[in-house]
Amino acid sequence: MPNEQQHVTNLDSWLDSYAARAETLAVSEVRALFSVVSRPEVVSLAGGMPYVAALPQDLLAKAYNDMMKEKGLLAIQYGGGQGDQKLREQILELMALEGINASVEDLVVTTGSQHGLDMLAGLFLDEGDVVLAEGPSYVGAIGIFRHYEAHIEHVYTDHDGMSPEALQDSIDKMKAQGKKIKFLYLVPNFANPSGVTLSADRRPKILEICKREHILIIEDNPYGLLYFDKPVPDALRSMDDEGIVYLGSFSKILAPGFRVGYVLAPPAIRDKMVLAQESALLCPSSFTQMMISEYLANADWKGQIDTFRGVYKERKDAALSAMHEYLPNLETTRPDGGFYLWVTLPEGIDSKAMLPLAVKELVAYTPGTAFYGDGTGQRYLRVCYSYPTPENIKVGIKRLANVINLQTDLMETFSNSGR
Ligand code: PMP
């Protein structure tokens, strides 16, 4: 009897025609879950979806009407490959909130920061090249780097973000193996999936190491403005403008459906990105860029970010208090912003193997293995608290505790019976 994979493959009469790189396109563990977790009875602590219902619909309706009245024909036309000039000027204002002072010429608007990452990977990575990344790291970036057949070398990361000493060790190790390091990929603020923030102390140290070793830094920062109590330390890009490519996005501070992100890059890289963008897309969507531009010009976008902060803080508090109540012995990160908790399971429990049992108990999470390019991460899981209500987060974590406790009991029973 063929398994499901064979069944699908057998139906594909173009199997011999695909490029070898098509093999590297695996369904992400997060996306694979979507069909299951969208059932209303399941509490999903899995996909990192922004709570867009906190965005007043009339704000967007007004931006749409005003934009169409003023610029309707331009909005439905092709635009420039680098992105809308006015929006790029407005993005400078946004980046200034994180200490970044830049020129509008060095900004490229992208179709979400995901597309920015893909273009960078396409520009820099040949098969076998090394990407240094936090351990754990963003699943969507891992998927891209794998697609370009890079080797992902995870660098030890703790509650203060990536360790500079471990970074130096990883660089030395890769160099000793004769490997070519192409860049360091970092999510310095409220990282996906760990929720941790790179401390102010470590930022200049990481920068100094990369400068000395001539390693480009890709600083991916979609969550930085979603802090709970105090702003994050200044961006790495605010300390250096030659060795850093900075990515930002409207997905978390407005809404992901617009698919608008941006990349700030040194001029030579920027030129190549514009060419790559023109080649892949001709131009980013004029329509959604102009909608966002209108929203930034006339709506209280800072007030809206405050609203999002309040929503996510309340949910983070609900998640941490439920962890404290139902799983008091498990270690979890305590984020100061963003969407995620990173939970360490008792030794011997495999988060990927446990997932079907959790879904049976009507709760879903993302297994830690999704966030490592080297097959590790079984002992961890990511809880995303951004989307469910605080009440449902509590219910979800209680269900999760039932599953984990049952696994722990079973392990103890087996180990006792073996004595
Ligand atoms: N980087 C990180 C760290 C993310 O968490 C995400 C989305 N989950 C992205 C990039 C991609 O965001 P978008 O393409 O929606 O801008």
Image (cartoon, grey):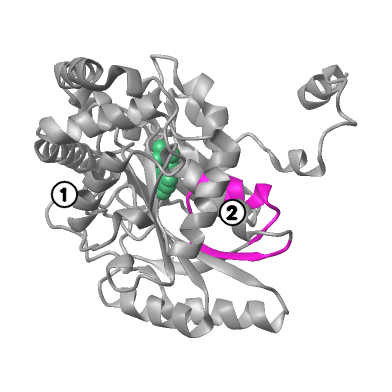
Q: Residue at x 13, y 57 (%)?
A: 230
Question: Where is residue 152 drawn, in percent x and y?
Answer: 61, 61
Q: At 90% from the left edge and 31% from the top edge, which residue is drawn?
A: 16
The x and y percentages for residue 346 are 47, 53
Residue 307 part of the magenta-drawn span: no
Helix, strand or loop at mark 2: helix
Residue 66 vertical position relative to residue 302 in the rendered view, above or below: above
Q: Position of residue 38 (x, y in %)?
A: 44, 18
User: Which disc number belongs to residue 228?
Assistant: 1
* Secondary structure category for the residue under label 1: loop
Report which residue position mark 2 lands on: 121
On the image, which quarter does residue 64 sit in?
top left
Pointer 2 local density, CA inside 10 Å: few below 14, some 14–19, many at least 20: many
Q: Earlier in the sequence, mark 2 or mark 1?
A: 2
Q: In terms of image quadrants, where is residue 365?
A: top left
Quadrant the N terminus occupies: top right
Q: Is residue 368 left or right of residue 353?
A: left
Q: In the figure, residue 297 lies in which quadrant?
A: top left
The dot on residue 218 is none
Question: In this orientation, does residue 324 appear?
Answer: no
Task: Give how far across and how far down residue 194 sits, in percent.
Answer: 39, 53
Q: What's the residue type where badge 1 is placed? A: Phe
> For the residue marked with disc 2, what is the amino acid?
Ala
> Would residue 12 be visible to someone looking at this image?
yes
Mark 2–mark 1 distance (CA, rounded to whole Å): 32 Å
Find the magenta span and give its range: 128-151
In this rendering, the answer to whether 150 lies above or below 257 is: below
From the viewer's perspective, is residue 418 above or below residue 253?
Answer: below
